[in-house]
Image (tube, grey):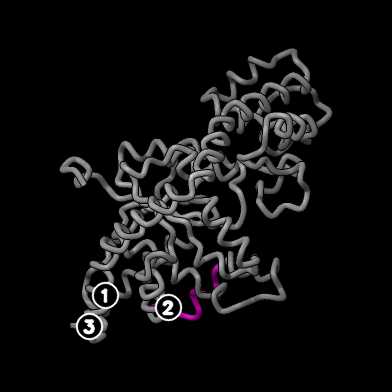
């Protein structure tokens, strides 16, 4: 790490390998990760341990983990600038997760809204990991002494939990953890379903027309945008409450082109929704094409991907083990000679 990069703040984020990134994942988070590399020391990881809370075929999980790693690189994450690794390749995460479990209170874990939501979605698999994974997430963050964690509106509770657990540990055993702050990207678009614009775009949506995968080809993307839900008003205007479908398409177009809502309204004044949907769909297709092509190239070079994963895991372990060793000493674990 250079002298200059050593002075940069650390920003850390993880993404689960539970399917190909959606346009929502890309515009809401991953697109901005590329730009963050210039201003921060960025640590990005594939959160495969977190994905164990839901049932996925083991062969499929391994494939999706490899795909997620390749997708980060295809989206412009540079392993020479950023630390990119698979969570389970660094054993420090599991150890720190248990220490954080033992610093977490049952009551605060039970109040986590995502636990309640996921329990309702998976009533046949309400496992202990689903309940305690905020403690593992806290360990993920605290291991690297992260200054910032990019968070959306539905993740602020987990960041507050992490700060509370870190504060409790520091007070009980002595101060070793930095308290991370939320990083709120200026233009992190909240992309909604194309078929139900009141719901967030999701990998798990059962309606294939509702979600854009960042690996969809141009023809598929244009077809999905053509069928996107709008309204009968025939006016391109940003109004989330009364025109959620149109507002969602404007949000997507703005995130890709950088145009303001007023500029978009002016661009499509007097034009029908057909022209509007076609233009937004084409902008998305043009944005995603080089990502899809780079992804295919990376997936066809398994030796390169494996080498990059190994390099990332080794560096992540070197960094994380320093914090883990301090934590183990503080709680009174007998260290190996």
Tags 1 and 2 in contact by the CB under 8 Å rule? Answer: no
Query: From the viewer's perspective, is residue 325 above or below residue 147?
Result: below
Dot 1 falls on a residue whose secondary structure is: helix
Query: From the viewer's perspective, is residue 119 above or below residue 301?
Result: below
Query: In which quadrant of the rendered image does the C terminus lie?
Result: bottom left
The image quadrant that residue 102 belongs to is: bottom left
Instruction: In this rendered view, identify the residue nearer to me: 295 or 197.
Output: 295
Dot 2 falls on a residue whose secondary structure is: helix
Q: Which mark is residue 233?
A: none
Q: Which mark is residue 327?
A: 1
Judged left or right of residue 299, residue 57 is: right
Instruction: In this rendered view, identify the residue nearer to me: 204 or 299.
Output: 299
* Place of residue 225 in the rendered image (x, y in percent of width and height, measured from the top left): 73, 32
Tags 2 and 3 in contact by the CB under 8 Å rule? Answer: no
Q: Is residue 105 magenta?
A: yes
Q: Is residue 71 visible?
A: no
Query: Dot 1: few (<14), some (14–19), or many (≥20) neighbours within 10 Å?
Result: many
Choose mark 3 or mark 1, whichever is in front.
Answer: 3
Q: Earlier in the sequence, mark 3 or mark 1?
A: 1
Tags 3 and 1 in contact by the CB under 8 Å rule? Answer: no
Query: From the viewer's perspective, is residue 170 above or below residue 212?
Result: below
- Magenta-drawn segment: 103-112
- Determine which residue is flagged by label 2: 101
Q: Which mark is residue 335?
A: 3
Query: From the viewer's perspective, is residue 199 above or below residue 57?
Result: above
> Residue drawn 39% across and 50% down?
308
Whole-number angstrom distance, CA of label 3 to CA of label 1: 11 Å
């Amino acid at each position: 790490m250079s002298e200059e990069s050593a002075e940069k703040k650390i920003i850390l984020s993880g993404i689960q390998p539970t399917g190909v990134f959606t346009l929502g994942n890309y515009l809401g988070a991953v697109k901005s990760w590329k730009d963050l590399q210039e201003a921060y020391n960025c640590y990005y990881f594939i959160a495969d341990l977190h994905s164990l809370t839901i049932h996925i075929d083991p062969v499929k999980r391994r494939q999706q983990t490899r795909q997620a790693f390749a997708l980060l690189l295809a989206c412009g994450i540079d392993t020479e600038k950023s630390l990119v690794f698979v969570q389970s390749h660094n054993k420090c995460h599991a150890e720190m997760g248990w220490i954080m479990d033992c610093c977490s209170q049952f009551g605060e874990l039970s109040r986590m809204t995502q636990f309640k939501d996921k329990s309702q979605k998976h009533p046949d698999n309400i496992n202990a990991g689903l309940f305690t994974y905020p403690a593992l997430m806290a360990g993920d963050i605290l291991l690297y002494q992260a200054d910032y964690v990019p968070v959306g509106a539905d993740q602020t509770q987990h960041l507050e939990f992490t700060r509370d657990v870190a504060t409790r540990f520091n007070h009980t055993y002595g101060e070793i953890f930095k308290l991370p702050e939320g990083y709120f990207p200026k233009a992190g678009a909240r992309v909604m379903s194309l078929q139900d614009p009141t719901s967030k775009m999701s990998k798990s949506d059962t309606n294939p027309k509702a979600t854009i995968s960042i690996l969809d080809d141009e023809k598929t993307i244009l077809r999905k945008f053509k069928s996107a839900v709008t309204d009968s008003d025939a006016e391109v205007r940003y109004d989330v409450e009364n025109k959620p479908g149109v507002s969602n398409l404007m949000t997507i177009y703005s995130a890709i082109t950088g145009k303001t809502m007023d500029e978009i309204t002016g661009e499509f004044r007097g034009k029908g929704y057909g022209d509007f949907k076609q233009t937004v769909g084409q902008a998305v297709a043009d944005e995603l094409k080089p990502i899809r092509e780079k992804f295919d190239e990376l997936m066809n070079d398994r030796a390169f991907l494996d080498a990059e994963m190994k390099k990332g895991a080794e560096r992540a372990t070197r960094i994380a083990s320093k914090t883990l060793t301090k934590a183990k000493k503080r709680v009174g674990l007998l260290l190996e000679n």
